[in-house]
Amino acid sequence: MDKLYRRTQILDLLKREAAATQGELCEKLARRGIRVTQATISRDIEEMGLIKTRAGYRLADSIDALPSAQPTLPIILKEFLREVRKASNLVVIKTHPGNAHSVAAALDAAEWPEVEGTVAGDDTVFVATDGTQEASRVRNRILDLVGP
Amino acid sequence: MDKLYRRTQILDLLKREAAATQGELCEKLARRGIRVTQATISRDIEEMGLIKTRAGYRLADSIDALPSAQPTLPIILKEFLREVRKASNLVVIKTHPGNAHSVAAALDAAEWPEVEGTVAGDDTVFVATDGTQEASRVRNRILDLVGP
DNA sequence: AAGTTAGTTGTATAATTTTGCATGGACAAA
DNA sequence: TTTGTCCATGCAAAATTATACAACTAACTT
């Protein structure tokens, strides 16, 4: 019936629990009231560009991609941050794999005055500032946000 | 016979040409003189942590999924590196398309003291260091590793 | 209304992948 | 040498995934 809704649910589902086969995905969708056959899910997977690992289906890129409510920067940071370092006028943030983009996006959204821009890889974000001092300040603010 | 060699060939093959099914992979390996059945390849794929997309098999996007088949940094560099440049406190590494992440991961794993972090795109890695001198040193160490 | 087109899905089946089991080789201990 | 233990692999069956085709729907057009 509602392809878009189903796919949103698929993404949401995969973020929370693993589904190693399309059949499994099918069952779990059914529990959410979505009844479709494995064939339909196969098509969804193709069009969504999901990838298959032995552990289960995953999004091609990062865990996010869902247009849902935005958790704020501190929440994102607490969730994904592993390490913060300064490198001259850059701040280097290490995140859990696949989540660099979320952190970078949250930082961008926060619009800190010292932050000139960000680049995200898979598990690392570079935050560009205008100078060494600014970089230090950004690093400190981040450390403040993640708490004691 | 030689599992390790076969897997090296699989990686090499996937870098150059697409293989959408295990059967296809099987054929292409055969052309390189490696004759195994699709079942063996299925096992290789599992142990190497490869992922399946509709377009073909690929290396996992997060290297941590690769069980230590640990090609060391010099090997990775020799294989993938195209160019190294310094840009202020950054080292910019150009790789063969699609392999930037492997190089970045290998660099991360090497834990060089001068390296504060890396970000990888498709064929480019930015390596952040804390200053111009450190960047030069990193560049030189990389050149040492690949050079004869 | 009737026809047309494009898009979505289920059914049935084809194609592909995974796996249980058996075989054979390498190596070590007896 | 003989025995036993790992592994790696092939074979074939089971499990999973992809797809051809037909049915249906919604939105238009004539």
Image (cartoon, coloured by chain):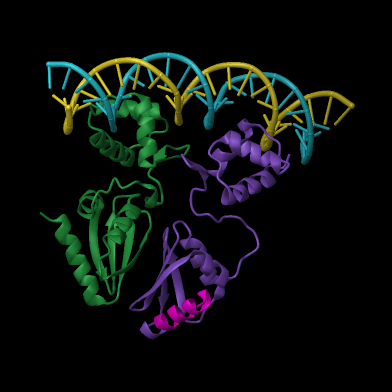
Chain colours: A purple, B green, C yellow, D cyan
Residue sitting at x 44%, y 83%:
A137
Q: Which residues are magenta?
A: A135-148
Q: Please state the horizontal and vertical placement of residue A129, each as a whole percent of the image.
A: 41, 78
Is residue A124 left or right of B2 when viewed as pictured? right
Whether residue A42 is visible: no
Secondary structure character of the magenta stretch overall: helix
Residue sitting at x 26%, y 60%:
B110
Q: From this view, report whether residue D24 is shown above or below residue A96.
A: above
- Residue A128 forms part of the magenta stretch: no
Q: Please state the horizontal and vertical placement of residue B1, each as a whole percent of the image.
A: 23, 28
Whether residue B146 is visible: yes
Q: Quadrant of residue B47?
A: top left
Furthest toward the left, the residue is: B148
Tell how many labels: 0
Q: Please state the horizontal and vertical placement of residue B73, each as a whole percent of the image.
A: 23, 55
Is residue C5 left or right of B16 when viewed as pictured? right
Furthest toward the bottom, the residue is: A133
Q: From this view, report whether residue B135 is shown above or below residue B57.
A: below
Is residue B27 left or right of A34 when viewed as pictured? left
Residue sitting at x 57%, y 55%:
A65
Depth check, front residue: B117 or C4: B117
Residue sitting at x 31%, y 47%:
B68
Q: Quadrant of residue B95?
A: bottom left
Q: Please state the horizontal and vertical placement of residue B52, each as a whole percent of the image.
A: 45, 38
Q: From this view, report whether residue B5 is shown above or below residue B129.
A: above
**Quadrant in which the C terminus of chain B appears:** bottom left
Q: Quadrant of residue B9?
A: top left
Depth check, front residue: A62 or A33: A33
